[in-house]
Amino acid sequence: MAFDITARIGAATTRHTLVATPQTCVWGYIDRETPPVLEVDSGDIIEIEAVTHHAGDAPDLLMDDGIRALWEGIPEADRGPGVHVLTGPIAVRGAQPGDTLVVRILDMRPRLLFGSNCAANWGLLYDEFGKERITIYGLADVADDGAFGSIAEPKFAYDFVTRPLYDVPGVVTPPDSAARQPFSRSVRVAVRPHFGVMGVAPLEPGKHSSIPPGVFGGNVDNWRIGPGATACYPVFAEGAMLYVGDPHFAQGDGEICGTAIEASLTARIQVWVERDLGVTSPLLETADAWFTHGFGAGLDGAMRMAATQMLWLMQTHLGLSADDAYSLASVAMDLGVTQVVDATLGCHAGLSRAIFD
């Protein structure tokens, strides 16, 4: 039984460009009442800029004029309760509660060649390290057309002492060559560009922190939400109201020290409205697999939710009985920890598409 979400997406109609400016971005929240900065039709393609909130960790390398304008144009009083710079919201005409918003990521390219990793106070092992540390990574290769290459390398690191804690969104640390230390040895990190945050307006009104993920998506932090992937979100508000941000160059499952390689990028996405998918939590399709997601105060609850979401997928869209889905989940489904640092913990379940070919 074939199930291919990406194949449902129709031909592109209109193309849009959404530049990240103080007028097109919000800082630290998702709010269903925020007016859209762009309205598009189902099937439209959007070239969208996404900016990292960690650009101040090395402003000489992670900021350009446009990013500095964001810092200057969005005052600290308007940042929060979360931390991420989000471009949007984007309204998709015709999207209604109960529908599914499908977002296909066509491609990504780096805006600048450097990104920051923060071993932060919210990291898993902060109690052991007792300090915060910034490591700056750079892309080792970029294609002639500006697309991502395959390797990132650490350039230098420094202990964060700009503030007692890294607790202000958008803090800027002035460059200090004396404090910047070399990495222990040469390593090569596989580049996995993706959106840490992508999702729709939640059901509940008010400003929701951009930090905890939920059934609406948001800060899911799954490194597979990158070029070629198709993400699906349940719609809770008219127009869906899509937010995009928290771009990363690379991340491992768990994101244990606090962040990924946080870096700004530009992507082309195509949005599509589906009426009959019945998605109730973020669903991801890649060329090789489907991924469902679970969230909870602990890993047990998050993993259980991810697993039950995959059982739903297998029964609803892959033609399996409940008993057969449960068996297949045990012998072929992979459960993993998406992230453990966003207050609400995340897990994912992966199932190979090849099983059903």
Image: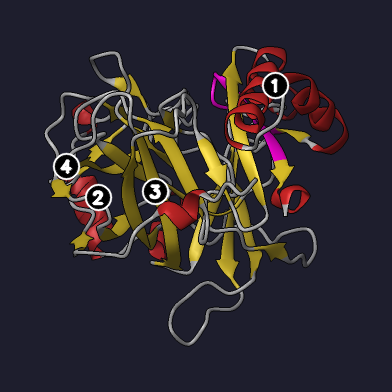
Residue annotated with mark 3: 103
State how far apart marks 2 and 3 are (Cα): 10 Å
Which residue is drawn at the image coordinates 75% and 27% (left, top)?
A: 325
Q: Amino acid at mark 2?
A: Ser
Residue annotated with mark 2: 42
Range shown magenta: 337-350
Whether residues under marks 4 and 2 lie with C-beta atoms below 8 angstroms apart, the answer is yes
- In the picture, residue 14 is in which quadrant? bottom left
52 or 357: nearer the viewer: 357
Residue at the extreme bottom of the image, as rendered: 144
Left or right of residue 161: residue 348: right
Q: Residues within 10 Å of mark 3 (few under 14, many from 20)?
A: many
Q: Is residue 253 magenta?
A: no
Mark closer to the chain start, 1 or 3:
3
In the rendered image, residue 89, in percent from the top left (x then y), is placed at 22, 39
Mark closer to the chain start, 4 or 2:
2
Which residue is drawn at the image coordinates 14% and 39% (left, top)?
A: 36
Q: Secondary structure at mark 1?
A: helix
- In the picture, residue 297 is in which quadrant? top right
88 or 211: nearer the viewer: 88
Q: Nearer the viewer, mark 2 or mark 3?
A: 2
What label sits on residue 303 in the rendered view?
1
Q: Main secondary structure of the magenta part?
A: strand
Q: Nearer the viewer, mark 1 or mark 3?
A: 3
